[in-house]
Image (spheres, rainbow, N blue to C red):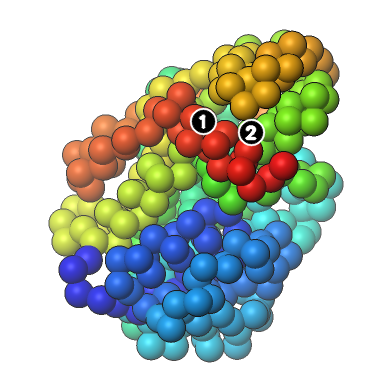
Amino acid sequence: MRIPSKILITGGAGFIGSNLCEYFLDQGHEVVCLDNFATGHRHNLTECIKDPKFTLIEGDIRNLADCQHAVEGADYVLHQAALGSVPRSINDPITSNDVNVSGFLNMLIASRDAKVKRFVYAASSSTYGDSESLPKVEDVIGKPLSPYAITKYVNELYADIFSKTYGLETIGLRYFNVFGRKQDPNGAYAAVIPKFVMQLMKHESPVINGDGNYSRDFTYIDNVIQMNALALATRNPDAVNTVYNTAFGDRNTLNNLVAYLKEYLSEFDAAIAEVPIVHGPNRAGDIPHSLASIEKAKTLLGYDPQFSIKQGLKEAVKWYWNNLR
């Protein structure tokens, strides 16, 4: 987008949302962040708040009035707000549904009524469920394996209906195991990479669920930013009102992941190379293997991810070392 626009980013104080806020401010756009700080952090917005083009609205997507206030005058919406985590949804499916489904519907209604140009939202690779086919192709999905996965699939169904019924342009981005700067290492539902990094920096043994041979398409944050930017900018009519895998298109086992983390962290602290790894039971609701086909995004959006897992981990480890010790 060459012309400066007003972009609402829900969940803008979170890991992905705050990175998107910084990026679009740097690109000269006006950015509004809506967040209730349930999982996001004010410190993620330290740089953004200094920018006169940035507005922070503390509110909840479960409240339609908050959504309507936040979207007022916006050209585009990047909907990142959600309660993530498969285990969290298993422990508390009602709250996950309230936020991820009812909150999502509120944002669609508010965006429709405000006549935003496009609604780009965070979908999830969990939508592939029990489908065993690899690589994951957008139009082949299985049955969801967790309440979280159900909520993210319902998002896609609602977005499709709003496109067809109300003419609201939507694009869903199925994120695959995103990692990078600002990802929270704390809390019961912390993502695996920052959690392992924190443990290794303390010389504590990371616990891998299962034998470590489950594999994931780990995706660095800058690849995700590129996809969001492309989804907002595309003028290809065939590229909207659909969903895209947002990934690098390669998979690594958890054992590989920990080996890379130990290698890169040991450049800062040699003792980390000797920290032993512990294996625990498999986690309920987890899919064994995940690998994205990114051909659709390449063809329709011009997606060209720049960071492999190794390149991304090197960048992330430097950030963790400098900011999380």
Question: On the image, which quarter does residue 137 sit in?
Answer: top left
Residue 34 point in image, percent of width and height: 57, 75
Residue at 57% across, 67% down: 45
Residue 53 point in image, percent of width and height: 40, 81
Above or below: residue 279 compared with residue 94: above
Q: CA distance from mark 2 to mark 1?
A: 9 Å
Residue at 18% across, 68% down: 2
Looking at the image, residue 73 sits to the left or right of residue 321; the answer is left
Q: Are marks 2 and 1 in contact (CB under 8 Å)?
A: yes
Q: Which mark is residue 134?
A: none
Residue denoted by label 2: 193
Q: Amino acid at mark 1?
A: Leu
Residue at 35% across, 66% down: 26
Residue denoted by label 1: 313
Q: Amino acid at mark 2?
A: Ile
Residue 303 point in image, percent of width and height: 26, 42
